[in-house]
Image (cartoon, rainbow, N blue to C red):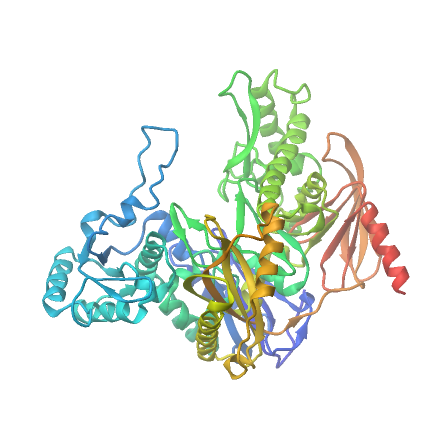
Amino acid sequence: MTLPQAGRRWRIGIDVGGTFTDLVAVPGDGTSWSLADAITHKVPSTPHDPSEGVETGLAQLLERGIAARDVAAVAHGTTIGLNAILQGRVARAALVTSAGHRDVLQIARARMPRSFDLHATPGRPIVPREHVLEVAHRFAADGAVVGTPGAGGVDDAELARLVERLTELAPEVVAVSLVGGYAAREAEQHLADRLADALSIPVTSAAAVWPEAGEYERTTLALLDAQITPLMTGYFTALRERLHRLRVDARVYITTSNGGSVSIESAMRRPVQTVLSGPAGGVSAAATAWPGTDMVTVDMGGTSSDIGVLRGGRPVLTTTATVGPHPLMTPVVEVSAIGAGGGSVISADGSGSRPVLRVGPASVGAVPGPAAYGAGGTHPALTDAYVHAGVIDPATFLGGTFPLRADLATSALAEVAADLGEGPAEDASGPDGVVDAALRVASVGMAARLRTVLAAHGEVPERYTFVAFGGAGGTHAALLADEVGVRRVLVPAAAGTFCALGAAIAPIRRDVARTVRTVVAERNLEALTTSATELEREVLDWLRTQDVAATGTVTLSADLRYAGQPTTLEVVLAERSTEVGPAEPLRLTVEPVLRRFAEQHEKVHGFTDATAAVRAETLRASVSVRLGEVRSGHGGAAFVKTGARDVRYDGTPRPASVHALAEDGEASVTGPAVIEKADTTVLVPAGWTATSDDGGNLHLVRGTAHAAGNAAENEEG
């Protein structure tokens, strides 16, 4: 167990899950450190008030030797906003929009839920139509006022009528989203401020949340932000009070959906940026711990497996994510989930002519959990399959603190085998056959999703390294890697609390955007450069409010497409140090931009068109500041053999050695083998070799990749 060093400054990351609240303390003095220096802690979550579990866990962590005065910062990831949206526990909202656009939420993108179902009905809009009010005010694409005389502001009489109607509706929050408001941020914000003064309730301007063209998406985003503002403000206030009771007088940061973090003040002003921060935490941790590497993160928990992608060590972002049925047009770490986790139910589906075996998407949950938990669960889960297969030892599960019942797992699997009867495979007539089929089905399902995610970016799995975390990530990662042809798997130290680690080391980050809609050509270069410079200045001004002394990077990019093309590709225009900023004028040139776009278009779509005009739809700027450096682990840790047992993972029982990490012992382990850690069990199949670095990270290499790696190291030596 890692013990704190007296007088050292610490940065504490917190991730609140449905079952446990995870805490990770890492050095926070800006120096280089190893993952072995991290201190981890887990406590049960408190759903009635998540901040209570946070206070309890933080108090216990401090009792392990960290003085409250030595806490430099607390970074907190939370799914409170996300859960509130999905469950409909949000503030009652009203929308103010331009005349003639009252049905913007009902029309949305004019798509039916199911294209070929004539009886399909659209989902309910985010707010009912009777709560949508109109004003005779809108803007053109250049920000000019349309259809309103004089200076273009809403006159006093119209404002009074609007306030009177809103008072009758009695909303708790209001969002203002005027047509074209993205091009007239100040004017839309002025109306929002006047309404807030008159109503004395929070009023959100859509252009202030995200000023990008797309009336439906921008309006929805503003409403989501408004609806969770009271809840999130209350939670953040309670969190501050609990930290104050613990005498933790540190900067508080909240992780965001783009894989970064912002000050708690920034999170209060725009809480919608936090809603998908949970799945982004592990991706952010991998990006910070192993920069410059092409990786696929596999977060396999109890209910699902979340798959993320890092290209060149940077998380792949998307602006087409959704929360339930609602679009999020802001940059979000692209994470694809599949219902295959340790708690995913293994069942016989008899809806067809012959029963077939299925894994998920239903989950047994934390209570009663898999049958092997002995808590009353009767449905077998993937965890039961691991137990019956010998991969998980019931006596050493979670370091021996949570013994399992192998007999209950086998009985539950036998019932599924009986339900399959004369199933599609002869070997599906007993628990062994069910286990073989379940592991195969889970691997194939995850592999199909992974290939789809990478293909959308013109990539193939073979050139990536897996980073597997979560309770079951290390258990299944090599099986998934075999399925898709990946040769390297990395299981981080403290894999079970990796998302909390992501919160602790997430960079300070902010994204902004501006719609430009112009052809990329010399005649428009000056205007594009001016807009990009203004965006750079905006993120640098924001960075000054975050109390960060470290130097970071500003990345300027543009969403480009061929004229007439419906989709865009994001192309980097320039990267500059935050120390440079506007003091050194930005210089953009057309030819490199067009060349990078052509290369990316060829990679994703398989062709280019040298004769077509290239249009820039949106300019983007992001600022990112890393907080300290994580040293990459290297040789030093070893393995000690603790036993042996038979395991089955490919239809055949095989004798496997069982190992634990130790200071002295074997430098590597060759499969079939099982490595048991306190927070996860790692399967090393035949043909794989495992080593451990001095940070406690496990490196699994398959077949020829290991030999090639050794040869390369020998040549370098």
Locate residue 505, reporting x and y percent: 58, 67
**Residue 171 falls in which quadrant of the image?**
bottom left
Which residue is at 51% across, 21% downward? 350
Quarter of the image with the N terminus is bottom right
Q: Is residue 641 left or right of residue 619?
A: right
How many tags in the picture? 0
Residue 605 in sight from this viewpoint: yes
Determine the residue located farthest toward the bottom in the rendered image.
583
Which residue is at 73% across, 33% downward? 650
**Residue 507 falls in which quadrant of the image?**
bottom right
435 vs 90, nearest the viewer? 90
Residue 299 in sight from this viewpoint: no
Q: In this view, does 251 lie to the left or right of 123?
A: right
165 vs 563, nearest the viewer? 563
Q: Is residue 565 above or below residue 223?
A: above
Q: Is residue 167 above or below residue 454?
A: below
Locate residue 614, reporting x and y percent: 51, 57
Quarter of the image with the C terminus is bottom right
143 vs 209, nearest the viewer? 143
